[in-house]
Image (cartoon, rainbow, N blue to C red):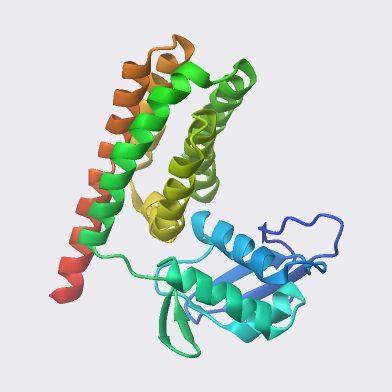
Amino acid sequence: MMYDALSAIDVGRFTSLPLRRRVIDYGDRAIVTVHKPIDKGNLSERVYSIIRTALMDGQYQPGDRLRISTLAEEFGVSITPVREAIFRLVSDHALDMKAATSIYVPELTVSQLREIQLIRHLLEGEAAGMAAQRITKPELEKLEAIQEAFQKAVPVDYKQAALLNREFHFGLISAARMPVVSKTLENMWVIMGPLLSRFHAEVPKRELASAKHKHFEVLEGLRTRDSDKAKHAMQADIAWGELMIEWLEKKENLAEA
């Protein structure tokens, strides 16, 4: 069931176009989305990009069902480009297709999450080390501002905190100037974004807002052009994600009990 909404998260990218606001009712909760009708061009590519961003930003939760007809209405396009985009996301392992019309956000298992974290540990660590040599002053200042905003958001708005956390990591990866690594890591974030958002909603806020957060050590490594410091700090930050794995294990155990 869908309702008009007064406010929503904007994942559209075409600011010159009018907004379409919808609330998608999932029974015990509702997803509020704002998508802008997509202008002509490569419609499938644009739909694909917007849904990927929404997944990374945690606007969908693990287990959510996506309906092609509903998305087509939100975007103001026909079903065909939405279907093409959905099929690409399924091939990326970002969505699960259980039947022709049954598309779901994956429920990651502990083993899948461990694999993603291993890839991130290796590649984001290397990216941080390279960024220490290649980052520009404006890029560093932007990362510092993002981290400051993240610290303020954690106690009051976990969704905003999750978005800022991703911005920090992606800003760092971009500064490394490693496009193949960047694309690989982006795919990892698309897959784990929904779970990460849920985790941020439940993890103790003191852990995220601590002045000892590893992002500060990463920033220090970047300021001093110390590749080893930046690399090891980023790997330590990702290793902190073991808390997320333990949290997911508890959920799996409860589900099996």
Q: Is residue 166 left or right of residue 195?
A: right
The correct choice, above or below, for 167 with respect to 20 in the image is above
User: How far from the left and from the top, in percent, is residue 232?
Assistant: 29, 24
- The quarter of the displayed image where residue 6 is located: bottom right
User: How far from the left and from the top, in percent, is residue 11?
Assistant: 66, 58
- Outermost residue toward the front in this view: 180
Tell me if residue 3 can be seen. no
- Outermost residue toward the left in this view: 257
The correct choice, above or below, for 21 with respect to 214 in the image is below
Comparing 214 with 148, the one in front is 214
Residue at screen point 29% across, 39% down: 121
Comparing 106 with 181, the one in front is 181
Q: Is residue 235 left or right of residue 146?
A: left
Tell me if residue 75 can be seen. yes
- Outermost residue toward the bottom in this view: 100
- Outermost residue toward the top in this view: 224
Comparing 241 with 118, the one in front is 118
User: How far from the left and from the top, in percent, is residue 80?
Assistant: 67, 83
Residue at screen point 47% across, 77% down: 28
User: How far from the left and from the top, in percent, is residue 155?
Assistant: 47, 39
The correct choice, above or below, for 133 with respect to 56 in the image is above
